[in-house]
Amino acid sequence: MEKEENKKYLAIINLSTIILFIIFFIIPIVFFFLLDKKTEAGFGFVQIIFSIIIAFFVTFFLIWVKSFIVNRPYLGTILSLIALGLFEYGLFIKYRGPYTVTFAIIIALIVLIYTGFYFFKYRKSSKEIKVESFDDSLT
């Protein structure tokens, strides 16, 4: 029984999750580094920690959305699009400029590709209506 539970936890952290985390770690690091070069806002330990937090948050949010998409593809996709819109809105409130637009487009493309991939993968399985036994005695 423990082996089955371990497999379930290992399925969450796999190669694609690690790659997703690395991508979402590199994007804010590069953004803050280029922002520092342009505005001299400062780049250091705080920005690195903030990038790690962003990477954890976005990666585990996408894993959570994926779990929605497996069972209810349309709900998971709508949830992902709403969260992406809120993230982009929050980003543009804080920062403006060509770097912000570039990184917002990169993040949006990654999230849309990830969500779209799992949406089209699990959409077919959700169309199968699972009918449980119907009891005529109740009517």
Image: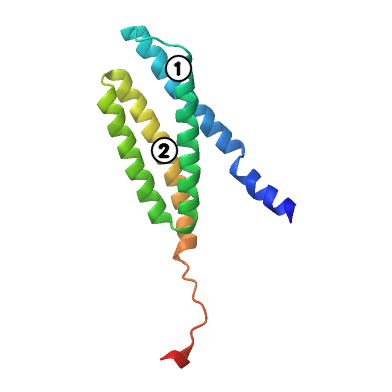
How far is disc 2 from disc 1 in space, using C-alphas? 25 Å
Q: Residue at x 38, y 29 (%)?
A: 106
Kind of element beneath mark 1:
helix
Question: What residue is pinned by disc 1?
Answer: 46
Circle 2 SS class: helix
**What amino acid is labelled 1 in the image?**
Val
- Asked if residue 29 lies left or right of residue 92, the reply is right
The residue under the point 30% across, 24% down is 101
**Residue depicted at 46% across the width and 91% down the height:** 136
- Residue 72, position as x, y percentages in the image: 44, 58
- Amino acid type of the residue tagged 2 in the rendering: Val
Does residue 18 appear left or right of residue 103 in this picture?
Answer: right
User: Where, by quadrant of the figure, is residue 13 drawn?
Assistant: top right
Q: Position of residue 23 (x, y in %)?
A: 49, 28
In which quadrant of the rendered image does the C terminus lie? bottom left
Q: What crowding class fits label 2: few (fewer than 14 Cα within 10 Å), some (14-19), or many (20 or more)? A: many
Q: Which mark is residue 111?
A: 2
Compared across the picture, whether 18 is left or right of 7 comes to left
Q: Position of residue 85 (x, y in %)?
A: 30, 39
